[in-house]
């Protein structure tokens, strides 16, 4: 049975993908697990996507989140990089669908506003806010894993509002 008070946050990327599981605690959210998934650079993209899919699927099985929250792909000047991130996002969403859990996407600006209160906050400010403002213990040092924690926290804050709007 999947726990709706647990969320798997994912900062998608083909080479490096941040993942974190947060739980809505009684006083404040808590980090249950955070890591950075890395795929072998020498492998073909399809093989790397398989590695990513399988790792996310394994995290879902192990941690039993009720929802997967993923950062939405932002299309900038580097279209090639954005395509790789979009493909990574696709296999991440597929893993959630296969597990029967809901997936929600959040824009980078939305995540930073929820965590820091400023949409253009630098990465170090996000980590500081997770520790100081939100009182989270065990915030990782790896930037992609920090982003995954922030995405999961954003979801925990926004999920009740999103559910109310859907009704």
Image (cartoon, rainbow, N blue to C red):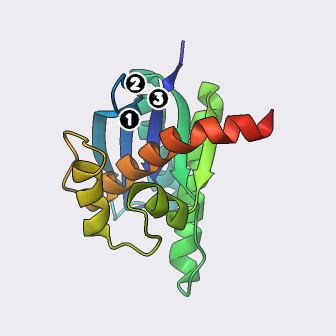
> Residue placed at 43% from the left, 75% from the top?
120
Residue 25 figure quarter = top left
Task: Kindly identify which numbered label has been placed on residue 60.
Answer: 3
Badge 1 vs badge 2, beta-carbon distance below 8 Å: yes
Q: Residues within 10 Å of mark 2 (few under 14, many from 20)?
A: some
> Residue placed at 34% from the left, 64% from the top?
41
Along the line of sight, which residue is nearer the eye, 138 or 97?
138
Q: Residues within 10 Å of mark 1 (few under 14, many from 20)?
A: many
Q: Say which quadrant the C terminus sits in.
A: top right
Q: Position of residue 101 (x, y in %)?
A: 61, 29
In front: label 1 or label 2: 1
- Give the distance between the C-alpha atoms of the residues marked 1 and 2, in whole angstroms: 7 Å
Residue identified by numbered label 1: 21
Left or right of 101, for residue 19: left
Q: Of label 1 and label 2, which has the lower sequence position? A: 1
Q: Residue furthest bottom?
A: 77
Left or right of 161, for residue 27: left
Position above or below: 144 against 140 = below
Q: Say which quadrant the N terminus sits in.
A: top right
Badge 3 vs badge 2, beta-carbon distance below 8 Å: yes
Residue identified by numbered label 2: 63
């Amino acid at each position: 049975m999947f726990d709706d008070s647990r969320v798997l946050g994912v900062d998608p990327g083909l080479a490096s993908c941040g993942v974190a599981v947060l739980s809505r605690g009684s006083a404040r959210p808590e980090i249950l697990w955070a890591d950075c998934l890395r795929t072998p650079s020498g492998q073909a993209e399809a093989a790397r996507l398989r590695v990513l899919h399988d790792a996310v699927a394994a995290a879902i099985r192990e941690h039993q989140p009720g929802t997967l929250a993923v950062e939405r792909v932002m299309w900038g000047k580097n279209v090639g990089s954005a395509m790789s991130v979009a493909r990574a996002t696709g296999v991440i969403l597929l893993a959630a669908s296969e597990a029967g859990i809901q997936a929600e996407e959040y824009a980078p600006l939305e995540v930073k506003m929820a965590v820091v209160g400023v949409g253009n906050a630098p990465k170090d400010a996000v980590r500081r806010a997770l520790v100081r403002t939100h009182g989270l213990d065990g915030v990782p040092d790896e930037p992609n894993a920090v982003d995954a924690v922030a995405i999961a926290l954003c979801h925990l804050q926004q999920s009740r509002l999103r559910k109310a709007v859907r009704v």
